[in-house]
Image: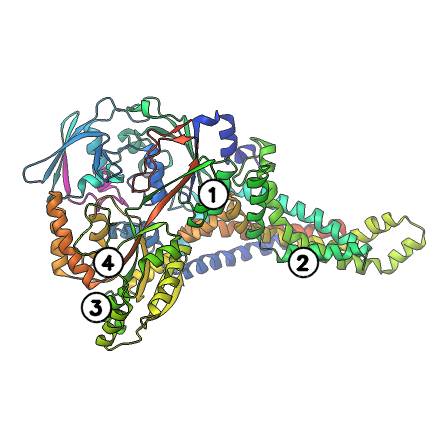
């Protein structure tokens, strides 16, 4: 075996040991990231790494408000069909190339046109990009599109070096060149991703680490063991059952924030003929009875150790777009029984498909025992995730426990799920009225107007119940008490700006 | 000897051919459209269509097999769709890690297994024998992942002696490498030590009761020479076979151990690839493992020649 072969898996630990401890942030991830190319990327965990690597046109803050990053300001045209952006001056990519309007045009076009791009749908209404001058760019839209700013505050707004992207093509993700606070050093799949401070970062005063090493450690117990033994400074997605012990350990701090995503149950109401074959898919009264038989607080306590906020919509009750006209219903077993009586099925039976993750399994078991009291006979079918997804897509299910990681704009949590024949409409739900309202929510830029539209959508959707939303998990982070400056932003991504080791 | 070697080598080619068909065929039995999972959360239909085209998913099975087998013959195992890295590069990166783990594990297993086996055979029906048997039973019945977590909690969290997980190349820092590998290698070797111990014991008991051992003793040879030189050497033949077979098992056993200790080796590579439906990686890794298994069996057969002179003469 040649020596060079052995060199490849260079140890993160050695690397860490060779550097001054306080200047390296050792970050434990719950899984390995996918390709580090903002155009092709598709995982949540990849976005955690991007938060240090690739700046975006905008960012979101703790209240989900859009704040400037590479774009300093924006202006909608009178007809809301053009968005003009003023760009930050003096920004360079990690290869020294200048960030300007031409780079923005290149990136938006790359997101839209690259084969296999996962950003195409997010930027679908953008028809063309005009470079006004070096610091001004205009995005022309085919129709007004309210979620655009939020898209530009995520991967669709990430800017990569045009020169590097052109040179590397679809291999760009192996050596990404962006303009974020840290630049790419190396990656060993399933072992580590190493970034180092970019000295010419436009906001370098806010960066206090020389390096960040991301170490994917899927097992929550082992991740925590690494934190406790001092090999990691920070871990994401702490196991909910580990929280009480961590709270009493003064060496560590815990932070939590309610996610922008949700956990719920999707019901096949029209995806396949199975929908008509079982009372749950066939009769909205049975679905109402099912929801009334659920005690969301109980589910959160038992399945999540209390580390989640209950909810009944695609956004959490604290979200500005939460429809207050449809509050979380209280458990009412008597009413549930009466509804089942009226529907003529006192003991409806159906199969609840669930991925094999422990959270999903626990939810299924709690739900099963809760709704039994109202007369439901639920059979749990645990299915490996990729397989369950395929079965959901084919309509080969009656009900499905499904989680969504969430998007900053409410549109990202509902359009693709409730829109007729949209890619994530596993329920097979189709309503002309809802489709019209969903489209209106996209073309209305005024937040107050949008809120009203979402109230109308909620009033219909939460009565038809193609999805029953249960709760919004907490993002749980644990870290050494020497670390300060952590911001809790509901998208669950760790902003490295301001993070400091004392 | 040369003839025998050539004969054995000739059987490897058709075996590998069938293995490749089996690997490819079994892979297709995995439920779920790989494009669905690879397209990420959004599952944009245009992305799914692009992946279908890129991975030839719409082609008939035999055509897809030919695409893959053709590539393999040219030394191209394809590319990981998830992280867009050539599979061969991934294998070259991960294989040394798992080989080191397996090697350390088998060394630990042999050291513990053979020693315990000899001791319990020589000291049959004594406290030593019972202790070795209890140890073997414990090793066989302890789940890897549980033992792994327990060791991490004891040696990393409580005592702080060893790193909880991760990997360090021996060429970077040998001490750190051994510190990181000792727990996983012990966990992996532990169960095999038990198997080896049981086999060494029974083989030793049989040999110790044979005529030539009695003759050796009658000649007045030192008991140590009788046991170690005369008896153990003969008793080792089945143990070597088993060791070689277990080495193959180790490669697969490493799957769980690598998960627990987050060692970036072959096992983690294949588990992640299966869950992400990264077909090219799964096929490449399984093909490599199968080749390693076949080669090890060949090496084991050759090792008989070295320890057993009668085979050498008859061949």
Task: Specify the quadrant of the image occupied by residue A384.
Answer: bottom left
Q: Is residue A27 visible?
A: no
Residue under label 4: A425
Residue under the image location 58 percent in, 31 percent down: B173
Between label 4 and label 2, give the one nearer the viewer.
2
| Residue sitting nearer the eye, A68 or B262 | A68
Between label 3 and label 2, give the one nearer the viewer.
3
Q: Chain of mark 3?
A: A
Is A123 magenta? The answer is yes
Which SS class for mark 1? helix
Which SS class for mark 4? loop
Residue under the image location 45 percent in, 37 percent down: A252
- Tell which circle, 4 or 3, labels the residue nearer the N-terminal end: 3
Between label 1 and label 2, give the one nearer the viewer.
1
Q: Are marks 3 and 2 in contact (CB under 8 Å)?
A: no
Between label 4 and label 1, give the one nearer the viewer.
1
Residue under the image location 82 percent in, 55 percent down: B123
Is A50 magenta? The answer is no
Q: How far apart are the alpha carbons under marks 1 and 2?
A: 31 Å
Do marks 3 and 2 share a chain?
Answer: no
Q: Are marks 1 and 2 in contact (CB under 8 Å)?
A: no
Q: Which mark is on residue A284? A: 3
Residue B263 as seen in the image, left or right of residue B178: left
Q: How far apart are the alpha carbons under marks 1 and 3?
A: 44 Å
Q: Chain of mark 4?
A: A
Q: Is residue B95 above or below residue A205?
A: below
Residue sitting farthest toward the left: A78
- Tell which circle, 1 or 3, labels the residue nearer the N-terminal end: 1
Residue under label 1: A223
Residue under label 2: B137
């Amino acid at each position: 075996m040649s020596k060079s072969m052995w060199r490849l898996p260079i140890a993160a630990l050695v690397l860490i040991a060779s550097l001054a401890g306080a200047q390296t942030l050792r970050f434990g991830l719950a899984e390995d990231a996918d390709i580090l190319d903002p155009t092709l990327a598709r995982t949540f965990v990849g976005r955690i790494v991007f938060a240090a690597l690739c700046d975006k046109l905008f960012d979101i803050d703790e209240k989900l408000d859009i704040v400037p990053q590479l774009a300093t300001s924006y202006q909608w045209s009178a007809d809301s069909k053009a968005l003009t952006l003023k760009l930050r001056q003096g920004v360079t990519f990690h290869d020294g190339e200048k960030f300007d309007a031409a780079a923005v045009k290149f990136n938006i076009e790359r997101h839209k046109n690259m084969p296999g791009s996962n950003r195409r749908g997010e930027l679908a209404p953008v028809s063309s990009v005009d470079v006004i001058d070096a610091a001004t760019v205009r995005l022309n839209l085919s129709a007004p599109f309210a979620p655009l700013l939020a898209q530009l505050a995520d991967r669709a707004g990430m800017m990569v070096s045009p020169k590097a992207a052109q040179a590397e093509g679809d291999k760009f993700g192996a050596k990404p060149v962006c303009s974020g606070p840290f630049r790419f050093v190396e990656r060993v799949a399933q072992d580590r991703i190493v970034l180092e401070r970019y000295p010419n970062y436009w906001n370098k005063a806010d960066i206090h680490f020389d390096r960040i090493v991301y170490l994917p450690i899927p097992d929550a117990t082992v991740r925590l063991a690494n934190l406790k033994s001092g090999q990691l400074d920070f871990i994401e997605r702490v196991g909910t059952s580990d929280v009480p012990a961590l709270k009493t350990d003064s060496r560590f701090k815990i932070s939590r924030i309610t996610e922008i995503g949700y956990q719920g149950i999707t019901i096949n109401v029209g995806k396949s003929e199975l929908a008509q074959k079982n009372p749950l898919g066939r009769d909205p009264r049975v679905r109402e009875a099912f929801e009334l038989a659920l005690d969301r607080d109980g589910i959160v306590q038992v399945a999540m150790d209390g580390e989640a906020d209950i909810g009944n919509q695609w956004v959490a009750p604290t979200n500005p777009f939460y429809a207050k006209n449809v509050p979380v219903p209280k458990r009412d077993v008597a009413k549930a029984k009466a509804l089942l009586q009226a529907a003529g099925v006192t003991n409806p039976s159906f199969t609840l498909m669930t991925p094999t993750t422990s959270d999903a399994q626990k939810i299924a078991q709690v739900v099963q025992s809760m709704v039994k009291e109202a007369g439901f006979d639920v059979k749990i079918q645990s299915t490996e995730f990729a397989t369950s997804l395929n079965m959901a897509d084919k309509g080969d299910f009656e009900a499905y426990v499904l989680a969504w990681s969430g998007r900053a704009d409410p549109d990202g949590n509902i359009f693709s799920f409730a829109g007729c024949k949209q890619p994530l409409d596993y329920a097979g739900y189709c309503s002309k009225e809802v489709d019209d309202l969903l489209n209106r929510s996209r073309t209305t830029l005024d937040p107050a107007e949008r809120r009203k539209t979402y109230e109308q959508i909620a009033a219909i959707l939460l009565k038809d119940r193609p999805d029953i939303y249960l709760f919004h998990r907490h993002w749980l982070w644990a870290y050494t008490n020497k670390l300060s400056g952590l911001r809790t932003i509901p998208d669950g991504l760790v902003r490295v700006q301001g993070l400091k080791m004392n | 000897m040369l003839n025998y070697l050539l004969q054995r080598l000739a059987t490897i080619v058709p075996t590998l051919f069938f293995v490749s068909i089996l690997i490819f065929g079994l892979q297709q039995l995995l439920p779920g459209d790989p494009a669905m999972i690879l397209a990420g959360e959004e599952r944009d239909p245009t992305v799914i269509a692009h992946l279908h085209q890129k991975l030839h998913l719409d082609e008939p099975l035999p055509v897809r097999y030919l695409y893959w087998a053709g590539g393999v013959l040219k030394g191209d195992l394809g590319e990981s769709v998830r992280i867009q890295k050539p599979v061969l590069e991934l294998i070259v990166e991960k294989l040394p890690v798992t080989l080191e783990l397996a090697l350390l594990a088998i060394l630990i297993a042999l050291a513990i297994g053979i020693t315990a086996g000899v001791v319990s055979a020589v000291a049959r029906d004594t406290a030593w024998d019972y202790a070795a048997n209890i140890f073997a039973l414990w090793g066989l019945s302890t789940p890897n992942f549980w033992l792994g977590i327990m060791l991490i909690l004891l040696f990393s969290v409580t005592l702080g002696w060893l790193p909880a997980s991760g990997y360090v190349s021996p060429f970077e820092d040998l001490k750190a490498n051994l510190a990181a590998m000792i727990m996983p290698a012990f966990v992996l070797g532990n169960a095999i030590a038990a198997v080896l111990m049981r086999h060494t014991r029974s083989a030793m008991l049989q040999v110790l009761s044979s005529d030539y051992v009695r003759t050796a003793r009658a000649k007045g040879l030192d008991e140590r020479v009788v046991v170690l030189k005369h008896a153990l050497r003969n008793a080792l033949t089945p143990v070597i076979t088993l060791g070689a077979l277990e080495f193959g098992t180790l490669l697969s056993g490493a799957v769980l151990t690598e998960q627990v200790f987050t060692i970036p080796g072959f096992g983690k590579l294949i588990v992640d690839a299966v869950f992400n439906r990264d077909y090219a990686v799964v096929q490449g890794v399984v093909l490599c493992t199968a080749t390693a298994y076949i080669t090890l069996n060949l090496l084991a057969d050759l090792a008989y020649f070295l320890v057993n002179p009668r085979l050498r003469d008859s061949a």
